[in-house]
Amino acid sequence: MIRLSVALLLASTAFTALPALAATRVKVQAGDHADFSRLALVSPQGAPEVDVESCGGRITLPNRAAWPLETLGAAYSRRLTDFRVADGGRSLTLQWPCGARVAVRQEKKVTFLDVAEPPVPARKPGAPAVEPEVVDVPVAEAPPSSPPLPSPPLPATPVAAPPPSPADPAIRAFDLDAWAGDDFPERKRALEQAIAETQGRARVDALIAMARFTLARAMPEEGRAALDAADSQRPATDQRYELRLLRDAFRALDGTADPDDSVFVRTPPGPAADHHVWRAATLAPTRWAEAKPGLPIVLKRLLSYPADLRGRLLTLLADAAGESDPASLNLIVMAMITLDGVGAGDGRLDYFRGRLAELQDSAADALRHYGNAASAPGLYGHRAQVRAIELRLAGGALAGGVMDDARAIAELETLRYAWRGDDVETDALAVLGAAYARVGRTDAALDIFGLLGRRFGATARGRAALTTGRTLLTAVVDRLEESSGGALDALALQVRHGRVVALMDDEAGTQRRRLARRLARDGFTLEAAKLLHGLAEDARGPRRVEIGLELARVLLDSGRGGEALAVLDHTGGGSADPALAERRALLRAESFAVEGEAMRAFDALRGLSGPAAVRIRARSLFQAGEWAASRAAYAEMLDKVDAPDPDDVAQYALAAFRAGDAEAVGAAAAKHGKRLAGTRWAGLLDALAAPVEPRGKPLSTAAVSGQLASAGALADVVRRWRAAP
């Protein structure tokens, strides 16, 4: 028994200690602003203890934490350096310039540590530096016999602050030939050996040399691996800047660089031609107008670049210029031809020559060059095939009419699977969707445009395809609204292509609202309500109120007054438009009336006038069993309109009948009987207006026949109501 108790005690102690042993993941970010550097910490353990010393500090948490040292080491900061973990994982130490101004504050769950430059004597922080003044102070000469006079005190002169160091130093020339080496295997083996045999700063230098080697050889994947390994070695400040420079170069080489966050764009161009090369490569994919001015310098410098790297950069520049700049594309193509036929083997050169001819409005030459490029099996061969199909369709080069699109569809269906996940697929899908739309295959076109939006919506071609698909969707909804039959068409569009419709629609949900109205008109109120409910949840402001009113109308038409009230309460209050406020009040009153709460409906109608308000009052009285008052309200409304609504006429006749006013029923039958013909109320007035035989007398044959006719007419009314509400 004692052994069991001891075992249980040890087990419970171990289980209690497990949470303390687990390292809590914390989120730490560091970055530079213009005047200070900031470290932000978010920890589930609560606010930490921050010790501030003259040249560094320590952040301590109650328990052990998983500190993101790799992320902090990769972040470039001029003032925050040398991040280390201490106290068994409880603390994070860091260094900053000695004497720096440090501020610590806590905002909710975030701890901010701001480090600014050390203060400068006689200058307010943040004020511009003041040059020292040289003041000439005259000195009076004393007589020989008198003692020397003390010199007057010199005025205090402000001490000039040292010139601020630039955020990023000037970018120097790249010695790419030395980085690449003459013998690839030997150079790579030497760099790998240097990495294996060194430690600390020397290993970081060896990894930087490896990254430079891979950059010169146009090997971005291997280069990024070397940079990641160097970041994990806690590089020094100067090494960290070199790593950032190389990482931005690899991003530019891949066409994925962010110009606003690139050293090559942030630093003003200097005398080094390499700076112009990599600045243009960074800007070209998204800001060709800014990259274009440096093109002559870039092309001249590329003459001495290694062949593989030169080919990658020329291709990147040609892709950007090929959108709309034939003059620049001509210079780049000439450089490709001059520099030992860059791209001649994989169809790249012929493809860009085709793009150049297309921009110069020479369709025949473009098709010829595209045909030459299409013979290559790679990326540019497939791109050339898609461009050739687009060019032929636009110029009518294929044999006429619908057969043109049918032939293009057959070729594009093959091409879309030949090269996946690149602009070849997006281009082929865009042309294919447009061809399906032209031949009337709407379902296939919507499927293609939806695929483009889901997979490639972030690309320029994907956005253009969504715009084309939006035009097609508008045409489809227009056709649905104009057609009287085909009630299942709207339902099929929503059920099969609901996600595509949502993807192609604009932010206001214009087409989805139109589709919901058509669904409600066809009797599919559940689908219409679901569609409008999703739109209302995403909308804000007056648009949310408008969609809420539409949703409440659909719910009321299906007899769901309670849900309509909930929707009006949930979506109200977002607009001060008097018209929307009046519509909302009328719908609230109608919802109360549908729910049988006549008094609350009257309260909601207080202060409102007009036919809609009068109709709701009359219906509320009718449902409350106030037949005489309902008859009077309906009579007042019917006298003010020339073409009354059949529902209002029927409700008036029923109220008069229940109130025992046979004269009013007969007058309604004589005056408004034709308004009910062809509606679900047809025959009602004739049935209600049938004369009643006096009591105490035998029924005549005519009276029995009349009552049977009235019963048959009422049965027909009930049947029509059940068949088509």
Image (tube, rainbow, N blue to C red):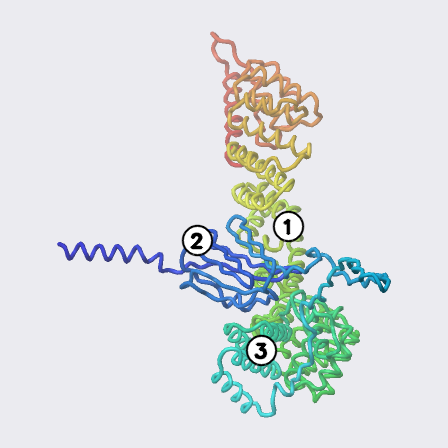
User: Which of the two residues, 298 or 266, is positioned nearer the viewer here?
Assistant: 266
Disc 1 crowd, CA 10 A, few/some/many (<14, 14-19, 20+)? few
- The answer for how far apart the CA atoms under marks 3 and 2 are is 40 Å
Q: Position of residue 134 (x, y in %)?
A: 81, 63
> Which element is circle 1 on?
loop
Residue 710 higher or lower than 152, as above or below: above
Q: Which mark is residue 230?
A: none
- Amino acid at pointer 1: Glu
- Can you identify the residue that label 2 sits on? 45
Residue 286 higher or lower than 536, as above or below: below
User: Which of the two residues, 664 or 149, is positioned nearer the viewer here?
Assistant: 149
Q: Position of residue 631 (x, y in %)?
A: 60, 18
Nearer the N terminus, badge 3 or badge 2?
Answer: 2
Q: Is residue 128 left or right of residue 146?
A: left
- Amino acid at pointer 3: Pro
- Can you identify the residue that label 1 sits on? 507
Q: Which mark is residue 220?
A: 3
- Amino acid at pointer 2: Gln
Residue 85 higher or lower than 188, as above or below: above
Q: Which mark is nearer the camera, 1 or 3?
A: 3
Image quadrant occupied by the C terminus:
top right
Disc 3 crowd, CA 10 A, few/some/many (<14, 14-19, 20+)? some
User: Which of the two residues, 131 or 367, is positioned nearer the viewer here?
Assistant: 131
Nearer the N terminus, badge 1 or badge 3?
Answer: 3
Q: Looking at the image, can residue 185 be seen? A: yes
- The answer for how far apart the CA atoms under marks 1 and 3 are is 39 Å
Q: Is residue 280 left or right of residue 22?
A: right
